[in-house]
Image: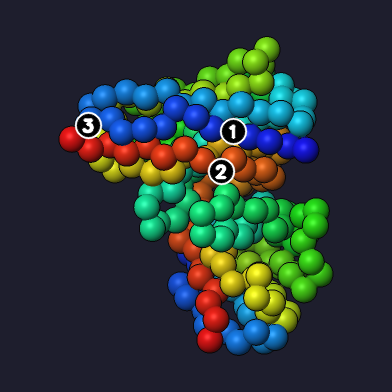
């Protein structure tokens, strides 16, 4: 059974940093791209970032480019999202998701809440 | 960036009735489109990929169609568990983009 468990969310002041983690199990982790998708309170889904299975390729939404960094440790079956220079508009539940190569996301985690507020 | 537009924003339907949800892309995404269902407090659940390929465990009352810029999700006979939010997503181009969602509510 595929399981994705996010952690690392919390309350942070504007301009601050957080690192989210997503621990994966139930599949061959290094064989799959992973993504982060966020959902602001009461709003729709917004894709944030993706990383290839080998970590060779990374992709970012314009709204987070230069501030967020995605990475992975295939020895720990974990994907990370380092978030710097956080803004109020980054407040959201952040979901990690398993992505079929060059395709759709088939499994999602429950998410971790990030609140950016003074 | 490819803009995905879903309509209507809210669809009021009686149990047992048919629901038709639309998703339009600002440029062709070929068949590289997925549909997701999301219930309050839950993670999204994959319904379709490749515009019309049903994901594992999705009931046959759900169907997906379309290609290029016009896509449709149809629920033939709504069950109580189908009242939820539905999102389309294109994965043809970076950045990946979602539609704004359609809420299917009980009439």
Is residue A13 visible to the viewer in this orientation of the structure?
yes
B3 relative to A13, above or below: below
Q: Position of residue A16 (x, y in %)?
A: 26, 24
Residue matched to label 1? A5
- Residue found at x 68% / y 62%: B67
- Residue found at x 52% / y 25%: A21
Disc 3 chain ID? A
Q: Residues within 10 Å of mark 1 (few under 14, many from 20)?
A: some
Q: Are marks 2 and 3 in contact (CB under 8 Å)?
A: no
Disc 1 chain ID? A
Q: Along the line of sight, which residue is nearer the eye, A48 or A23?
A: A23
- Helix, strand or loop under label 1: strand
**Discs 3 and 1 carry the same chain letter:** yes
Residue matched to label 3? A14
Labels 3 and 1: the sequence-earlier one: 1
Report whether B81 appears left or right of B62. left
Report whether A90 appears left or right of B6. left
Residue matched to label 2? A110
Q: CA distance from mark 3 to mark 1?
A: 26 Å
Q: Are marks 1 and 2 in contact (CB under 8 Å)?
A: yes
Labels 1 and 2: the sequence-earlier one: 1
- Residue found at x 70% / y 58%: B47
B28 relative to B64, above or below: above
Quarter of the view holding residue A115: top left
Image depth: mark 3 or mark 1 in front: 1
Q: Along the line of sight, which residue is nearer the eye, B13 or A67?
A: B13
Q: Position of residue B22 (x, y in %)?
A: 57, 71
Labels 2 and 3: the sequence-earlier one: 3
């Amino acid at each position: 059974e595929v399981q994705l468990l996010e952690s690392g969310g919390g309350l942070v002041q504007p301009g601050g940093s957080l690192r989210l983690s997503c621990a994966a199990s139930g599949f061959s982790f290094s064989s799959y791209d992973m993504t982060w998708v966020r959902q602001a309170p009461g709003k729709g889904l917004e894709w944030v970032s993706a990383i290839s299975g080998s970590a060779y390729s990374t992709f970012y939404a314009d709204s987070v480019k230069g501030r967020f960094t995605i990475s992975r440790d295939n020895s720990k079956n974990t994907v990370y999202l380092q978030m710097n220079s956080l803004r109020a508009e980054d407040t959201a539940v952040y979901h990690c998701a398993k992505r079929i190569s060059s395709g759709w996301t088939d499994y999602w985690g429950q998410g971790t809440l990030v609140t950016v507020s003074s | 960036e490819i803009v995905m537009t879903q309509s209507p924003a809210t669809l009021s339907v009686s149990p047992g009735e048919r629901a038709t949800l639309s998703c339009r892309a600002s440029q062709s995404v070929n068949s590289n489109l997925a549909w997701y269902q999301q219930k309050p407090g839950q993670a999204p659940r994959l319904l379709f990929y490749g515009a019309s390929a049903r994901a594992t465990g999705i009931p046959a009352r759900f169907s997906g169609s379309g290609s290029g810029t016009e896509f449709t999700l149809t629920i033939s006979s709504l069950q109580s568990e189908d009242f939820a939010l539905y999102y389309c997503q294109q994965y043809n181009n970076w950045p990946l983009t979602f539609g704004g969602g359609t809420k299917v509510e009980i009439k």
